[in-house]
Amino acid sequence: MANEEKSLCVIQNNESQDVEFYKQAYEQEKARAASLAGRLADAKNEADNLQFQLDRIKNNPVWKASKPMRQAMHWGLRNYRRVRNLGGPRGIARKLRQKKIEAQAKKQHGTASFPTPEQAQMQRETVFPRMVKISILVPLYNTPLNFLDEMIQSVQAQTYQNWELCLADGSDATFASVKERCGEWVAKDNRIRYKKLEKNEGIAGNTNECYAMATGEYIGLFDHDDVLHPAVLYEYVKVINEQGADYIYCDETTFKGDSINNMITLHFKPDFAPDNLRANNYICHFSVFSRKLLEGTELFRSGFDGSQDHDMILRLTANAKKVVHVPKLLYYWRSHKGSVASDISAKPYAIAAAKGAVADHLTRCGFKNFEIKSTRAFDTIFEIKYEILSEDKVSILIPNKDHVEDLRRCIDSIKERTTYSNYEILVIENNSTQQETVDYYQTLEGQENITVVMYQGEFNYATINNVGARAATGKYLLLLNNDTQVISMNWIENMLMYAQRPDVGAVGAKLYYSDKTIQHAGVVVGLGAHRTAGHTHYKINYDNLGYMGKLCYAQNVSAVTGACLMVKKSLYDELGGLDENFQIALNDVDFCLRIRKKGYLNVFTPFAELYHFESASRGIDIVDEAKAKRYEKESAHFREKWKDVLTKGDPYYNPNFSLDYSDYSLAIKN
């Protein structure tokens, strides 16, 4: 009986402790909700006051009378901003250089890139172990005859000749000439197959009719008004044989008029990047894939007309064993009135269809409660907000030596602007000598979520962060420089939504210098004078869209800067933290490459924004001769350690880009 009473007592005590725990948690959440409600109310009051003042100004007779002067002023400001967005005189010079390089590059990627007669003969005579048949599907609808002829001729010109061209014609009675012309082509070449449809089934339905005619092992999707490079099938069959590719795509360009040399936009793509693809159908043309990928699924789904290709690419690449990007410009997308290449607004339903395609894909991948929003770059370039599955503790590691004002600004910005509540700050102190630093640390000691961790060895950025990581109690680590300042209030959420995914390693933020030019927007391996690593879009103005809108959506990258990097603590520990052989530089890039080697993705998100007053705390290495030598030593070590990666090239940075510039300038072949 005594034992029963004792057990009952223990249960009651445990229940009492549980009640107290949940009561405290409730009170904490209640206080947090009240604080957020108060901040929201303050913001609403401020907005209401500003709106009242704005209405009063607009109704003022003087304001109305000054409209012509304001219009002239705004014209001047718009043009000033255009110059400013280029980055002033240096930016204008950069833009002029880009234009010059692009003009030269266009000459290399047009008809000048076609194989010579000797090369064409060699390609035609090449016998691969797998001489797969490729069925090229082309849905026709009211196709102008000159476009039809050029399209068919570009297929017939292929140096790899085991193909068939499947044409399904949904043209109306006003374009009866399409049937007649196709009949002429079929009579000349038995590899061309044609079917006149009873009615137009739309892009999806017409393409599915093409697929029903196909007999090839691989399927290629081709638009009725576009042009293929004569070596594209040869290049594709080559990677099918060499790499076992079951999904292949290439680089592409839009062109106008009667010549593919009249190029408008050259789109050089990264290798397969799932986060890029979710935010933006960067793959687009020219997709060729194994017929086996369609087993158990449809080619095009009519519910996604207008974005049927994005839906198909998301489904098929998710199932593919080997997606291969051929980094050559092999597809020419004609821009003309009414085409999507000319203007997405020509087909507004495509925007809704694209969001639906991405939503369907994310749901199939197990994601719930996500949001998909168009960005300022383009209506079909998306910001995806993933659900935060669990508000786990994030440990923010900030190495510091003196520079109290930098540290104070950093910590104050975290406390004042961060909406995520479950975090701790660990300041890793490294041999400060100033009394004001000691005094400031004492003010931090009384704050429950801030700890000062002591490290007394020589300065080694990797070692300092590793010491901080060992003291951290969070599920996630957030490496942060002391010379940063938070801009986005939901910066932690925007990083955590990726870091929580089981397939993601490191997540990096968008960082600006004090003049709002970009300091970091992802790291490219091999970029820069040392051929180690460099930041893309460096010193570009903050509101620039970036190359093909890259500054407006989250994407996969090889590496992100350690100035603001989030990673699971378990993964950090598994990798042994930062490599302490890289005392000053490249330890973050090395860490990210080791993450990639383990099979994880690294992500850069432009929706977590901070200022980074770079090198304010330690000085610029290359100014000091000893530091410059140390940097070169670490660079040499990096180049040796990652020789294979550097030789192969960054998979997320097209080899057609120059490694001398960070602005996606094209490389010019000698």
Image (cartoon, helix red, strand yellow):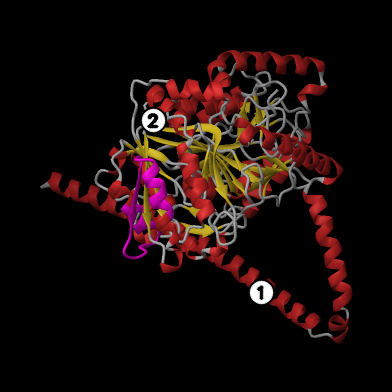
Q: Would residue 368 be seen by someone viewing this image from the given angle? A: no
Magenta highlight range: 181-209
Q: Is residue 577 left or right of residue 8?
A: right
The kind of residue tagged 1 is: Asn
Q: Is residue 325 left or right of residue 322?
A: right
Percent coordinates x, y for residue 244 in the rendering: 36, 26
Percent coordinates x, y for residue 133 in the rendering: 34, 33
Identify the mark at residue 45; answer none if there is no mark.
Answer: 1
The kind of residue tagged 2 is: Ala
Question: Image quadrant of residue 68?
Answer: bottom right
Question: Image quadrant of residue 270?
Answer: top right
* Between 325 and 615, the one nearer to me in the picture: 325
Q: Residue 122, relative to residue 471: is it above or below?
A: above
Q: Residue 245, relative to residue 172: is it above or below?
A: above
Q: Residue furthest left?
A: 1
Which element carries disc 2, helix, strand or loop?
loop
Identify the mark at residue 269; answer none if there is no mark.
Answer: none
Q: Which residue is mark 2?
A: 245
Q: Are marks 2 and 1 in contact (CB under 8 Å)?
A: no
Q: Residue at x 61, y 16 (%)?
A: 639
Neighbour tally class for label 1: few under 14, some 14-19, many 20 plus, Cα within 10 Å: few
